[in-house]
Image (tube, rainbow, N blue to C red):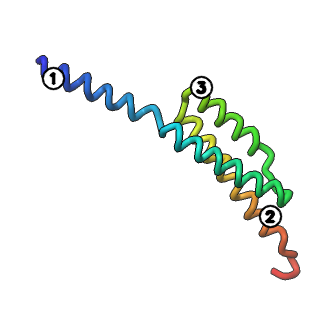
Amino acid sequence: MKKFAILALTSLFLLSACASGPEKSVVEATIKAAKAENAAAKKTGFLWRDAGKTIKKAEAALKAGDNAKANKLAKQALFQGKQAQIQAKEQATPYSKL
């Protein structure tokens, strides 16, 4: 019974450690990449409306210690920055040339 209790507590500890999300350094790198992609999108004039807000929310979640939420928001902002640049390239081609 004692071995079972130790095993159960160890498992609970390991699962709780995994639930905290990615490491802070990973989230920080994702936020940095999102900022860079959105800065490039802004230069094209196609920056998406909520990109800046999403980055700020990611930074706030990271500061609060919610790495999983911060990472999710940072990835969303990264996606928005990349898609905005793709949109700029696609809309730069006149329809008469398609």
Is the residue marked by circle 3 packed among few (<14), some (14-19), or many (20+) residues within 10 Å? few
**Mark 2: which secondary structure?**
helix
Q: CA distance from mark 2 to mark 3?
A: 35 Å
Relative horizontal placement of residue 94, taking residue 18 as reference (left or right):
right
Q: Are marks 3 and 1 in contact (CB under 8 Å)?
A: no
Between 52 and 26, the one nearer to me in the picture: 26
Q: Which residue is mark 1?
A: 4
Q: Which residue is mark 2?
A: 88
Against 24, residue 88 (above or below) is below
Query: Which quadrant holds residue 95?
Result: bottom right
Query: Which quadrant holds residue 28?
Result: top right
**Mark 1: which secondary structure?**
helix
Q: Are marks 2 and 1 in contact (CB under 8 Å)?
A: no
Expressed as whole percent of the image width and height from the top left, the position of residue 47 reads 80, 52
**Mark 3: which secondary structure?**
loop
Expressed as whole percent of the image width and height from the top left, the position of residue 90 reads 78, 69
Q: Which mark is residue 64?
A: 3
Residue in the picture at 20% in, 26% down: 7
The amino acid type found where label 1 is placed reads Phe
The amino acid type found where label 2 is placed reads Ala
On the rendered image, what quadrant is the N terminus found in?
top left
